[in-house]
Image (spheres, grey):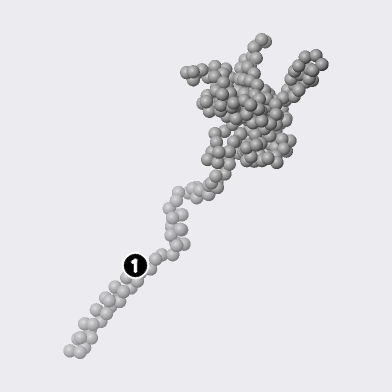
Amino acid sequence: AAEQAAEAKEPVAEQAQEVKDTMGQLLVEPPAVEIVAESKAMEPPGIESEPAGPALNVPLFPELFVTNHTMPKNLMSAIVANFNNGARAVELVLADPRSKHTILGALAIVPDAFRASATVLTRRRDRRLRLRVQQHWRPAEDAVGEAEEAELFYVSKTSNVTSMGKALKNKFVDYAGNNVHRTVKLVFKGAQAGSNAILAIESASREAYRELAFFVKYQEDEGSGEGEEKQGKQVSLCATLTAV
């Protein structure tokens, strides 16, 4: 009887050991290296993993910040240096609201070989004025005849930028939004007048729902007054503003 009981326990012990070994195999996770190898083996030949994308919030073009200590000549040199390094355009970010005229002074002395033009961009959440300066690009102007020239707007330090923006808008589009003219010119002299000119351009672009590009040049004006009180020639800035 004892021998028969021992023989009956042996199959039960063997089955219990088999169950224990099976459960142990199920609980053991396969190594990560084997999973990677299997996943790569399942990919079609010639397909590799995609490289990591660019960092977030990287500016599309180089940015130059204009402060109260920025000089027009230094800003012009920075713009030209970026152009020579292969940049298609640069963005000027106004860090100090008192330095709007510095931007126009720098644009006026950019060499003509670059044929640079600027566009006032829509402001972002930081509310800073931004301009994009592109090289070798200027929109087509109006066909000017012998007796017909682009209309001149004279900007002073007391000019109302909102009213001037609406006046410029009426030259580009009519009351129904149809295109009228393509080109006007702004003439100004002095820091405050330059600041008003660039704000008027921004206001006109917003009022007309048009992208407006401009380039700036120095010009000589005839002196005012008569006789002995007549002043000599004076230098002012002229911005040629064109609807794209």
SS under mark 1: helix
* 141 w.r.t. 11: above or below: above
* Residue plotted at (73% across, 35% down): 73
Q: Quadrant of the C terminus?
A: top right
In the depicted structure, whether residue 74 falls above or below residue 233: below
Residue at figure coordinates x 64%, y 12% from the top left: 148
For the point 66% across and 10% down, the residue is: 147
Question: Is residue 138 in view?
Answer: no
Q: Nearer the viewer, residue 91 or 130?
A: 130
Work out which residue is located at the far top of the displayed protein and give it. Answer: 147
Of 78 and 233, nearer the camera is 233
The percent coordinates of residue 68 (x first, y second) are 68, 40
Q: Residue visible at 55% across and 38% down?
A: 127
Q: In the picture, residue 126 is in which quadrant?
A: top right
* Residue identified by numbered label 1: 26
- The outermost residue toward the right is 228
Question: How many numbered tags mark residues here?
Answer: 1
What's the residue type where badge 1 is placed?
A: Leu
In the drawing, does residue 99 fall left or right of residue 20? right
Give x and y (percent) for residue 74: 73, 38
Residue lying furthest left: 1
Is residue 9 among the parts visible in the rendering? yes
Measured along the vertical axis of the image, is residue 2 above or below residue 97?
A: below
Closer-to-camera residue (2/90): 90
Q: Residue 56 in the image: x percent, y percent?
A: 53, 46
